[in-house]
Amino acid sequence: MEIEEICFDLENQSLHGLSRGEDGSDIILCLHGWLDNAASFLPLMPYLKDKKVIALDWPGHGFSSHRSQDAHYHFIDWVYDLLQLFELNQWQDIDIVAHSMGGMVASAFAAAFPDKVRSLTLIDSIGFISADAEKATEQLRQGMLSRLQGTKKRKNIHATKDSAIEARVQVSDLDYEHAALIVKRGLVKDADGYVWCSDSRLRTTSPYRLMLSQAEQFVRDIEAPVQLIHGSKGMDMVSSGIKHFGPLFKTLSAHELSGGHHVHMEQPEQTAKLITSFICTF
């Protein structure tokens, strides 16, 4: 079955993505991590059979539109993007698979809108990034300075796609093949070469963080059953998150697979088996 390009027109922007499966089938909504795009789910899609799999590009990523020039990329605004998407399609009771930052957004969404999320599978992601209240002023300062400096920076230009792929490999645990999938959806060609089409503002420091008590409350308020699939060589914050946030979930099952932060790309068949088994249990 072919993978198709899709687009959803929201209030002030367009959300693009990839889709595979028959209309009318149960939906699995896939949400990628920071500076990735929908292509990070390409290896997984063929193994999620008999489902309508939809993988989105978050705003500012992939083919989706950038936020307006007077806006920024606040974490909570991505929750609103999801709400708009669900309202547009009149979705209820959807199974969500979410990686890294996408897992944090999906967790907050599931907590706030329990009627819209049937199940939540987190991939190398659990809980939220948080900070002590005493650090709020310094966080604000660094965030504002980062914005100011960001307006003066130019995007890196690569002479070839291979150069861009190698650059992504150097700053991640991705192998060349998997990096290529993500990078090719994240490049645009201009007169000087290839540049990233992701919004530069995504790289600015956040001016605020959730306090730990807020992050804990979000987790406690998730009603949907939650499954965590994490890599044996995944992010350290996932290991610590299992210990801290794990006991706060109403329902949580955890599975470790051999691999890194993008374990769903490295082990797509095993990841799909866990997802399918999980969503078929209720």
Image (cartoon, rainbow, N blue to C red):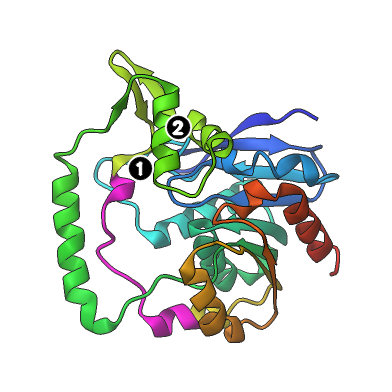
User: Front-most of 33 and 112?
Assistant: 33
Verify CB contact (< 8 Å) between mark 1 and mark 2: no
Which contiguous range is marked in magenta?
201-216
- Residue 83 locus on image (x, y percent): 54, 56
Left or right of 124? Residue 42 is right
Kind of residue at badge 2: Ile
Find residue 165 and name its label: 2
Classify 272 as above or below 217: above
Q: Distance between the residues labelled 1 and 2?
A: 25 Å
Residue 214 part of the magenta-drawn span = yes
Which residue was labeled with disc 1?
A: 67
| Quadrant of the frame with the C terminus | bottom right
Kind of residue at badge 1: Arg
Rendered residue at 41%/57% (across/down) = 77
Left or right of 12? Residue 263 is right
Classify 93 as above or below 32: below
Residue 75 part of the magenta-drawn span = no
User: Front-most of 262 and 113?
Assistant: 262
Name which quarter of the figure residue 126 lies in: bottom right
| Label 2: how many Cα within 10 Å (few below 14, some 14–19, many 20+) | many
| Label 1: how many Cα within 10 Å (few below 14, some 14–19, many 20+) | some
Q: Tag 2 or tag 1, which sits nearer the N-term?
A: 1
